[in-house]
Amino acid sequence: MVFLTDRGRVRSHNEDNGGIFVNKDGTMLAVVCDGMGGHQAGEVASERAVSHIKEVWEETTNISSPEPAEIWLKTFILQANQTLFDHANSHEECNGMGTTIVAAIIGDGFVTLAHVGDSRIYLVSEESAKQLTEDHTFVNELVKTGQISKEDAEHHPRKNVILQALGTEKTVKIDIKTITYDDPGYILLCSDGLSDKVKDRELVEVLNNGTHALSEKAEELIRRANHYGGEDNITVAILELSVSEAGSG
């Protein structure tokens, strides 16, 4: 497992945050948040959301199946939303702050995911990078309703308009689902500083490079995003899916 964040080549500070945290049973939770809001309020939003979730997770036990994992993510992401919303309302300099969030609990044979906003989670195998989340963006709604193509979406002037974020409203809609896996591969969480720049085929190529350690793979993804412009903060969390009782293939 590896977590890495980078300011990028243009921004003066990093509003992304996240990490990989282990609970009392040894179960892993990965989180990536991309903060927004003026006067460095985005930094405050992403940092507070991550620290709240980390604190609760590290005291948690018995998340050994999808149902408690889904309940846990919903409960504590909603709690983080409330915390941010209250903070923004009581601190004028944080008015309007918010953050995206993607979170993944890696269980035995299953991964439970939650997300709000346009940070993403991918399942990367030897053949493909499958996006497991659906961006909560204005442009993605246009794609879904057939008004523009996926190719058009990449260059749309309103590409970065987010429809859902943590902390901006009293309530928030969280997308939560569980996938099962029985093949080795990787779960990749990232902010849009990576997904806007690095193509799916490159994710597959970098993560399946057998000569590189996981930390080098994370560094290479960030290097490529910077090479393509690095206009945004770039954050990645990578978890290897190990398959117990796997054959020798």
Image (cartoon, helix red, strand yellow):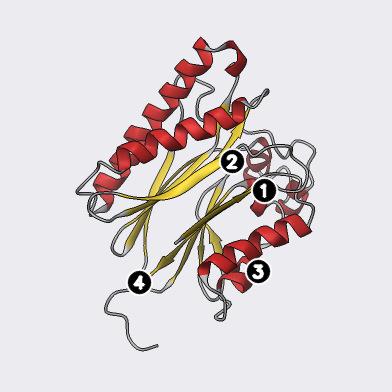
Amino acid on which disc 3 is placed: Arg
Q: Quadrant of residue 71?
A: top left
Q: Residues within 10 Å of mark 1 (few under 14, many from 20)?
A: many
Q: Are marks 3 and 4 in contact (CB under 8 Å)?
A: no
Disc nearest the viewer among 4 and 1: 1
Amino acid on which disc 1 is placed: Gly
Question: Mark 4 highlights which residue?
Answer: 182
Q: Nearer the viewer, residue 247 or 137?
A: 247
Residue 135 is situated, as x and y percent measured from the top left of the image, at: 58, 43
Disc nearest the viewer among 2 and 1: 2
Q: Secondary structure at mark 2?
A: strand
Residue 16 got which mark? 2
* Label 2 – label 1 distance at C-alpha: 9 Å
Q: Residues within 10 Å of mark 2 (few under 14, many from 20)?
A: many
Q: Secondary structure at mark 3?
A: helix
State which tag comes first along the sequence, 4 or 1. Answer: 4
Residue 80 got which mark? none
Q: Are marks 2 and 1 in contact (CB under 8 Å)?
A: yes
Left/right placement of residue 133 relative to residue 245 reads right
Q: Residues within 10 Å of mark 4 (few under 14, many from 20)?
A: some
Residue 201 got which mark? 3
Question: Mark 1 highlights which residue?
Answer: 193
State which tag comes first along the sequence, 1 or 3. Answer: 1
Left/right placement of residue 75 relative to residue 202 reads left
Q: Residues within 10 Å of mark 3 (few under 14, many from 20)?
A: few
Q: Are marks 1 and 3 in contact (CB under 8 Å)?
A: no
